[in-house]
Image (tube, helix red, strand yellow):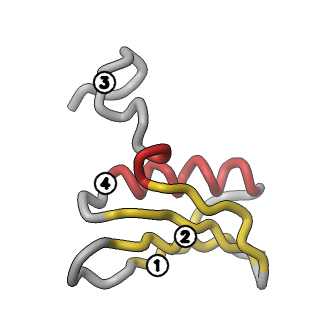
Amino acid sequence: MVYFCLIETGGPTASHLEVLDAECAQAATSEARRLMARHASAVMVHVIHGDETVASIPAAIATAGFDGADGSGSGV
């Protein structure tokens, strides 16, 4: 079954839905975190598999470490 990522956005921007290229919930969640980091207006990301929400992650948690401040992010 396919995993989907719903990126909720703040303000007037519409939410964004992506199909994830993942074989398991952990890989789907990791990919969803990376996608969310690319959306400046994102406030929450949901990983969906069938009728089940596998994960719901607030933006502050999903993007932690992607700014390079802790040495693990890209620093870009």
Label 4 crowd (10 A; few <14 / some 14-19 / many >=20): few
Q: Position of residue 41 (x, y in %)?
A: 26, 64
Relative depth, front residue between 24 and 60: 60
Name, please, the residue furthest toward the top: 71
User: Which quarter of the image is occupied by the N terminus?
Assistant: bottom right
Relative depth, front residue between 49 and 43: 43
Q: Which residue is mark 1?
A: 17
Q: CA distance from mark 4 to mark 2?
A: 13 Å
Query: Which label was assigned to residue 38?
Result: 4
Q: Earlier in the sequence, mark 4 or mark 3?
A: 4
Q: Position of residue 20 (x, y in %)?
A: 57, 66
Badge 1 element: strand
Badge 4 element: loop
Relative depth, front residue between 15 and 28: 15
User: Do the residues bearing badges 4 and 3 touch, measured as CB atoms within 8 Å?
Assistant: no
Label 1 crowd (10 A; few <14 / some 14-19 / many >=20): some
Q: CA distance from mark 4 to mark 3?
A: 14 Å
User: Do the residues bearing badges 1 and 2 touch, measured as CB atoms within 8 Å?
Assistant: yes
User: Do the residues bearing badges 3 and 1 touch, measured as CB atoms within 8 Å?
Assistant: no
Q: Earlier in the sequence, mark 3 or mark 2?
A: 2
Q: Which residue is mark 2?
A: 5
Label 1 amino acid? Answer: Leu
Residue under the image location 34 percent in, 63 percent down: 42
Query: Which label was assigned to residue 68?
Result: 3
Label 4 amino acid? Answer: Arg
